Image (cartoon, grey):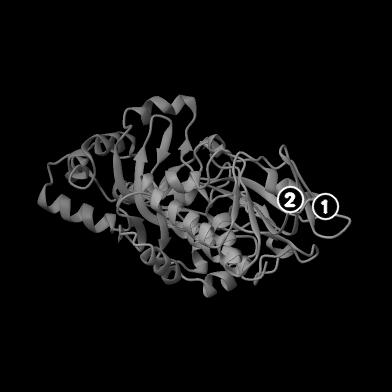
């Protein structure tokens, strides 16, 4: 066997989780090779947070994650916290700021996070091979694994699958990690796009397009999800943080409930407006809280119509209050993986150790990051999961 092609640990994927795991394992003295299919590592890190990388969330907790096995993420998250990653960021002299609700961003560029991870890998002696697509992973009869690549086979005692999900295929996303899991007999839960904008039927697009670019704060609910955040009209439907968040809870055919007053009591507001300006029309009153074009758009579509406030009687008022606080929106679909920030579903966590991320029935095989059925909310949670589960695997691989 050619020793140059042999190593202790092969990490498949040079993204957030892969680089972190490689650095941790390398620092323990393990010989680590990272295999990345695209021409550079950390491509999704570079584009995240508008180019400034929302690298963690100070308030990250298990409640911020979706999984068929909701307890699975607790162990890794408890052992590697946002404070731990912030300490690493500070050790590298990267300036950062809190944008809102615990979301931490680089002051300058997401390139700094990629550089930090690559520096950590370099310091640990990690061998990184880019432009090296993964063709297959198989057991070596002599022990360990063989990773087949166009450049030839690599042998490793252990393999860590950190290949990501299906979101943003233009960044090189593929289903290779799920294929590897199935090849070794691990179950994979159905995948779908998460943290993704919604589209509307072609017949409704003209109505939405006229409001394209308008943003406002709302509360959006669907199934077990409820989020207060920004909503943005697009020429194809609805986007913005509130819609991205709720998309992870939405299933085709579901109706999303939108509170245009973001939790404020609409009945009290309407009563006060009617007392102060009885001759004002509904659109005019709504424009004191919402963008004017949106106010006009809503008034036209409310059952009461754009009446003067004094004309709203005991029959129409409750209906109006319900419409403004629980506006039903049934999307036609989502934008899909093309613009999705994450992939829901993935390698079934019941087949993995929550302490090490190792496959329970395949010695030496690990799955970390987005390929696993653990998906975070918007706002730095998915990165924190990447760091935490990578640390958990890196300490033992």
Q: Which residue is mark 1?
A: 1
**Number of numbered discs on residues:** 2
Taking the image as shown, residue 262 lies to the left or right of residue 309, namely right
Front-most of 187 and 239?
187
Q: Position of residue 309 (x, y in %)?
A: 19, 44
How far apart are labels 2 and 1 at the CA level? 8 Å
Checking the image for residue 5, the label placed there is: 2
Asked if labels 1 and 2 touch by Cβ distance under 8 angstroms, the answer is yes
Question: Does 363 sit above or below residue 199?
Answer: below
What is the crowding at mark 2: few (fewer than 14 residues within 10 Å), some, or many (at least 20)?
few
Q: Residue at x 25, y 39 (%)?
A: 295
Residue drawn where x is 53% and y is 51% of the image? 248
Which secondary structure, mark 2? helix
Instruction: Out of 259 and 385, give the one closest to the viewer.
Output: 385
Query: Callout 1 environment at 10 Å: few (<14), some (14 to 19), or many (20+)?
Result: few
Could you tell me residue 366's position as x and y percent? 69, 60
- Which residue appears at 30% of the width and 38% of the height? 298
In which quarter of the view is residue 304 placed? top left
Where 20 sits versus 5, above or below? below
Q: Position of residue 130 (x, y in %)?
A: 59, 42
């Amino acid at each position: 066997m050619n020793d140059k092609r042999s190593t202790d640990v092969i990490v498949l994927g040079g993204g957030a989780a892969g680089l972190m795991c490689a650095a941790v394992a390398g620092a323990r003295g393990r010989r680590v090779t990272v295999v990345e299919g695209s021409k550079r590592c950390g491509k999704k890190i570079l584009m995240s947070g508008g180019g400034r990388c929302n690298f963690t969330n100070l308030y990250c907790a298990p409640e911020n994650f979706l999984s068929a096995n909701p307890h699975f993420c607790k162990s890794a998250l408890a052992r590697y916290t946002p404070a731990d990653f912030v300490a690493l960021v500070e050790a590298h002299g990267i300036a950062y700021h809190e944008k809102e609700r615990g979301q931490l961003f680089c002051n300058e560029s997401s390139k700094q996070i990629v550089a930090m991870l690559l520096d950590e890998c370099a310091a640990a002696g990690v061998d990184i091979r880019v432009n090296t697509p993964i063709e297959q992973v198989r057991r070596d009869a002599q022990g360990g694994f063989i990773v087949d690549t166009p450049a030839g086979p690599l042998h490793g005692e252990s393999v860590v699958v950190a290949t990501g999900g299906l979101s943003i295929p233009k960044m090189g996303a593929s289903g290779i990690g799920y294929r590897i899991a199935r090849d070794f007999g691990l179950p994979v839960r159905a995948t779908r796009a998460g943290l993704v904008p919604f589209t509307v039927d072609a017949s409704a697009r003209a109505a939405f397009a006229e409001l394209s670019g308008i943003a406002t704060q709302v509360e959006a609910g669907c199934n077990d999800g409820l989020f207060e955040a920004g909503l943005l009209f697009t020429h194809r439907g609805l986007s913005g943080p509130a819609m991205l968040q709720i998309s992870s809870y939405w299933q085709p055919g579901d109706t999303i409930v939108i509170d245009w007053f973001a939790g404020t009591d609409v009945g009290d507001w309407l009563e006060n407006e009617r007392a102060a300006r009885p001759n004002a029309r509904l659109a005019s009153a709504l424009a004191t809280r919402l963008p004017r074009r949106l106010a006009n758009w809503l008034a036209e579509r409310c059952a009461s119509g754009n009446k003067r406030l004094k004309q709203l009687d005991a029959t129409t008022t409750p209906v109006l209050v319900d419409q403004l606080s629980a506006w039903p929106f049934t999307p036609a679909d989502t934008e899909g993986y093309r613009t999705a920030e994450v992939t829901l579903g993935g390698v079934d966590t019941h087949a993995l150790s929550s302490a090490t991320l190792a496959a329970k029935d395949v010695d030496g095989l690990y799955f970390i990051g987005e390929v696993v059925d653990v998906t975070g909310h918007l706002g730095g949670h998915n990165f924190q999961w990447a760091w935490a589960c990578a640390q958990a695997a890196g300490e033992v691989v």
